[in-house]
Image: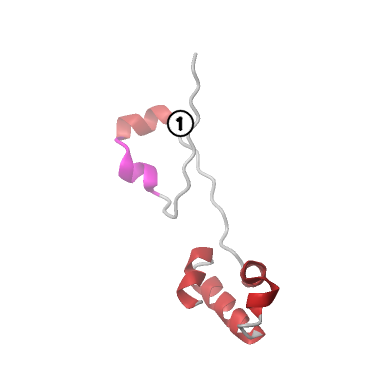
Amino acid sequence: MVVVLFKAIANTFDLPERVMQRRVQSRLGLSRETFSPYTFNQLEEIIKSRLGKNLSRLFEESGIAFIARKVASLSGNISHIIKYI
């Protein structure tokens, strides 16, 4: 017997329903793992660590905090920070 393991990461919860036919879905035995969005504190820490000490001097603390709060309140999705920086 051959066991095939397939993992997919998506920003949408209904990806299997959109992509696969119903008979294929039923044979796969799908299970989902949902992740919580990042919090303001987590986003702020990620921004600071990614910018590093030299680049973080380009932004004021209040600016970084504003961006982190904005993204946390809308989606918590780290990729959305790129829109604001």
In the depicted view, which residue is nearer to us: 26 or 42? Answer: 42
Which residues lie in the magenta part?
Answer: 14-21
> Vertically, is 74 above or below 31?
below
User: As rendered, which of 54 and 29 lies closer to the eye?
Assistant: 54
- The type of residue carrying mark 1 is Gly
Q: Nearer the viewer, residue 25 or 78?
A: 78
Q: Is residue 77 visible?
A: no
Residue 55 appears in view: yes
**26 lies above or below 3:** below
Q: Residue at 38%, 30% (x, y): give it.
A: 26
Residue found 32% across the figure and 45% down from its top: 18
Q: What residue does disc 1 label?
A: 29
User: For the stretch drawn in magenta, what is the main secondary structure?
Assistant: helix
**Residue drawn at (70%, 74%) of the image:** 53
Residue placed farthest to the top in the image? 1
Instruction: List x then y, in percent, for residue 63.
Output: 59, 84
- Against 4, residue 37 (above or below) is below
